[in-house]
Structures are given as structure tokens and as C-alpha cells.
Image (cartoon, rainbow, N blue to C red):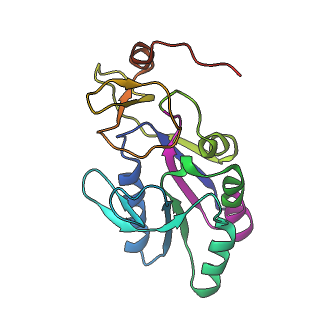
Amino acid sequence: MAKLYFNYATMNAGKSTTLLQSSFNYRERGMRPLLFTAALDDRYGVGKITSRIGLEADANLFTAETDLFEFVTREVKQDRVDCVMVDESQFLTKDQVYQLSEITDKLGIPVLAYGLRTDFQGNLFEGSQYLLAWADELKELKTICHCGKKAIMVIRVTETGEPVIEGAQKEIGGNDRYVALCRLHFKDATRQPPKTS
């Protein structure tokens, strides 16, 4: 039975590397994985999933308007699809997470989503919120803070390394813009209690 998986972590935990390794494993066995990545992340080229260790693969782009269920349904009519893999899944909408569940439930295709859990202010991304709620299986990929403790948060930094505490939730960047931290060092860096609604 197909399942919806959410593999989440902070920055630099190997999410894209793990996705690319899984994709390679499918292809090595003569199967066809269908890869997606967020259109707004073009740091390494449009339609590319790239890991920090140099692995890369072509991927289909999604925006907030992309109907993933419809896209995969069209693909299945032309060729078989053995697995759907989504990088940068934190940028999915609630509707798109539902569409991924439909791919699993109605088309019988496993879906592996990889993404951040929280943003630089410690808030859930929309895609992550609904993947955490609706995925059949959750897996945390781990990395460490500079102190050696498990990193579960991320801060955005300026060019000089100063923490940024306000701004748009979605801003693409790598090690030049984001640092993975444990909760203690996240709180020290941001020095502000979370905003309540």
C-alpha cells in the first residue's frame, strides 16, 4: 500500500541528498521516479534539485498554482510513475499537500516529501504544517548546532552574520543566509519571545 512520507529537518541535514539517493535507487531498479521542486528556488538552475555534496537531478517545477494530482495523473497516462518525490516541500500549499495524499490514496503511488519544518522565526511553513498533520510516516533527518546538540531551528543571517528577526517567510538561500541551531542558541540569537496570534 502506497504512503505519504514527510522527511523533515533544518538546513544542512541532507534532505536533497537523501531525495537524490532515493531517486537513484528507483532508477537503478528500472523504475521511474517523478521529481518536483519549488519554482522559486533557482539557486543552482531552473528545474534542478542539487545537494551541497554535488549530486543533482532534473525536476518538474511547482508553484502555488500547480495541481500536483492533475500533473501526476497526466504523467501516468503517458508512462508509469513508480514514486513521486518533492524537494522544498515546505513551499507546498495546504491544497497541494491534499493533492499529494490523493496521489497516494487514489493512484497508489508512494510520495516522498522533503522539506524544512520551521522558518527563521520558528513558525511552521504551510506545507510542513499539513505534511506533519496528514503524512502516513514522518522522519526527522538530523544535523547539529555549533555546540554539538541536535539542531532543530534555523536563523536567517545578514552578510555579516547578524541574525535577521523580521522579513518575508520565503527567502531562498544557503549557508550564506541560514544557520542551523539548537533551540537554546536559536533563542539566544533571536532574543525575542514568539509572537502570539
In the depicted structure, whether residue 20 falls above or below residue 31: above
Where's residue 107, x and y in %? 70, 70
Residue 94 covered by magenta stretch:
no
Image point (40%, 35%), residue name:
142
Assign the C terminus to one quadrant of the image. Answer: top right
In the depicted structure, whether residue 30 falls above or below residue 160: below
Front residue of 29/40: it is 40
How many numbered badges does the structure rendering display? 0
Front residue of 31/19: it is 19
Residue 105 covered by magenta stretch:
yes
Residue furthest out toward the bottom: 78
Front residue of 105/186: it is 186
Please tell me in which quadrant of the rendered image residue 163 appears.
top left
Image point (55%, 65%), residue name:
84
Image point (33%, 31%), residue name:
158
Where's residue 56, x and y in %? 32, 63
Q: Which residues are magenta?
A: 101-119
Front residue of 126/101: it is 126
153 relative position to 45: left or right: right
Where's residue 30, x and y in %? 43, 78
Where's residue 148, x and y in %? 30, 22
83 relative position to 25: left or right: right
Image point (34%, 37%), residue name:
177
